[in-house]
Amino acid sequence: MQSVMIIALGLAGMAFGWFVYSKFIATKIYQLDPNFVTPAHELEDGVDYVPTNKFVLWGHHFTSVAGAAPIVGPAIAVYWGWVPAVLWVTIGTIFFAGVHDFGAIWASARHKGKSIGALSEEVIGKRTRALFMIVIFLVLLMVNAVFGVVIANAFVGTPNAVFPAWSAIVVALIIGQLLHRNFNLTLLSVVGVAALYGAIFVGSGFPIELPEQVMGLGSKGSWIVILFAYAAIASMLPVWALLQPRDFINGLQLFVGLVLLYGAVLLSLPDISAPAFNNAVTLDAPSLVPLLFVTIACGAISGFHGIVSSGTTSKQLDREPDARFVGYLGSVGEGSLALITIVAVSSAALAASPEHWHEIYDKYGSAGAGTFIQGGAQMITNGWGLPLAISTTLLATMVVLFAGTTMDSGVRLQRYIIQEWGEIYDIPILKHGILATLIAVTCCLLLAFGVGGASGAGGLAIWPLFGSTNQILAAMTLLVISVMLIKLGRPARYTLIPMSFVLLTSAWAAVLKLIEFYQAGNWLLVVIDVVVLVTSLMVMLEAISVIAKFRRENSKDGRAA
C-alpha cells in the first residue's frame, strides 16, 4: 500500500505545480504575451523554424529532454532509500525543472530562438557566450556518445526491441508527411500508436541480431556506427519530416506506458521492499548530499533541458503562452516518469523481500535502466495480466525510443552550436549544415572509438563528469534567465533561489569528483572537470558584475529623475 501513497503524494504535488505555481510564473514573472510574434513565425524557414501545434511540440520537447535519464537516474538514486529520491523528484519538478525549462523556452523565443549559449551574450556579455558554449558542447558530446552506447547495449541485450524501434521511424516519417498535408491529428495519433504497439507485439517474437563481427567491430560497435549515421541524416531533415512526428508518437507511447505502469500499481498494490533510508550503504559509496542532486538530474532539473528548450523547441513555438504547456508540463511528464521508476525499482515486483532488494542494490551504481525494465515489466504483468515477454519488450522499446529521440535532437543541437560558432567567428565553412553535422558526428565517433576501441564505448570514459557538468549548466541557464528578469524589472528570486541551490550542490559534487579523479590519476577527467569549474565560476562572476552595473545605473537614473 506504500506504493499507492508514494504516487498519490507525488502526483498531488506535481498537480499543484501545474495548476497553481506554473500559472503564477507565467502571468507574474515571465508575463507571457499572446500577441508576441514568435521566432517560428518571424523566421519561418520550413526546416528549423516551424510554427507547431502545442501538443505536437510538447511531444517533441518531452521525449527529447527525457531520454533514458529520468529512468536511469532515479533507479540508481534509490540506493540511498526511496524517500530522498521521491522528495527530490517532486520538489525538483515543481520549483526547479518546470521554471528552468519553461524559462529557457521563453527567454530564447524573446531573442529570435537563440540557443542559451548565444543568448548569454545579449543578456550578460561576449566573454560569457564563449565560456557557456564550451560547457554546452561538452554536455552534448557526453549525451550523444553515451546514448549511442545505451541504445546499442539495449539492442544487443533485448533484440526483441530492434524491430519496433526502427518501425517507429517508418511510422513517424509517414505521419510527418500526412501532418504536413493537414490530416486530422487525432486520427493520426490513434493510427500511429496502434502501429507502434503492433510493432512491439511483433517484435516480442521477432528478435533481430547483428553478426558478432562486422569489419572488425563487434555487434555493439556496429550498432553505434549505424545509429550515428541515422542521427546525422535525421538531424538534417526538416523538423516536421521526422523529429516532430517521431517525438509526438513517442510522447503518446510514453503516456500509454505511464497509464499501464500507474494502473498496475493501483491494480496490484505492490509492497515496497526498498528501505525509506538505506542505512546499509557500502563504505566506498558516495554521500547522499550532494550526489543525490546530480544523480537525479532529468526528473528534477537538468541543464540538457535548457539546451533543447532554447535549441529546437523555441524555434517551433507557435504562440508565446504555449511555452508554459510545452516547458512546464513537459517537466511534469518527466517527473511522473521518474516517480513511477522509483516505485518500480523499490517494490516487490522487482524484489520480493528487503533482503532480495539489498542483493540487487549491493553497491552504488549496481542498478539502472535494466532494473527498471525488470521491475516495471513484472509490475505490468502482475497488474494487467500481460505476458511478461510483451511487458518487457514494451518497456525496453520505450527506453530505446526515448534514448533515440534524445540522440536525434542532440546531434541537431551540436550542429546548431557549430553553425553558431561559424556565425560568431565569421567562419563560412562552419555555417554549412551538412559539414556542421559531419563535424558533430565525427566528434562523437572519435570519442566513442578513439577512447573506447572497437566497442565504441568511449563515451563512458567521460560520463562520470556528466552529472555535475549537466547541473552546473542548469544553474548557468537559470542565471541567464535571472539576469534577464532583473533587467526587465521583474522579481528574480523564483529563478535565483533554485540557481543558487543547484550551483552549490553541483559544484560541490564536481570538486569531490575532481579529488577522486586526481587520486586515480585520471588526467583527462581532471582537465575537463577543472575547465568546467573555472568556466562556470567566470560566468557567475561576469553575471554578478553585470547585475551590479545595471543596478548602479538604475540608481543614478533614479537620483537624476
Image: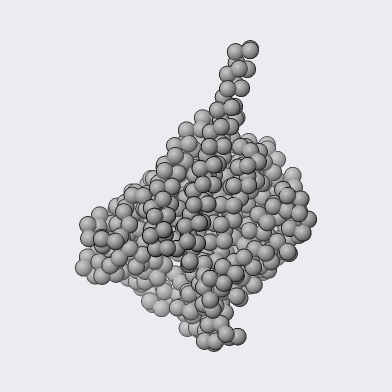
57 to 462, vertically: above or below? above
Give percent across and percent down for residue 80. 29, 57
* Image point (61%, 37%), residue name: 124
506 to 174, vertically: above or below? above
Q: Is residue 355 visible?
A: yes
Is 43 placed left or right of 187 in the picture?
right
Q: Is residue 184 visible?
A: no
Give percent across and percent down for residue 204. 47, 80
Instruction: Write down the quadrant of residue 79 in the picture.
Output: bottom left
Is 409 placed left or right of 97 in the picture?
right
Give percent across and percent down for residue 68. 47, 63
156 to 509, vertically: above or below? below
* Image point (42%, 59%), residue name: 517
Q: How many marks?
A: 0
Give percent across and percent down for residue 287. 31, 54
Using the image as rendered, state which of residue 435 and residue 153 is in the foreground. 435
* Image point (67%, 64%), residue name: 439
Colour mode? Answer: one colour
* Image point (73%, 64%), residue name: 434
Is 178 placed left or right of 267 in the picture?
right
Using the image as rendered, state which of residue 34 and residue 427 is in the foreground. 427
| The N terminus, quarter of image | bottom left
Instruction: Write down the quadrant of residue 299 in the picture.
Output: bottom left
| The C terminus, quarter of image | top right
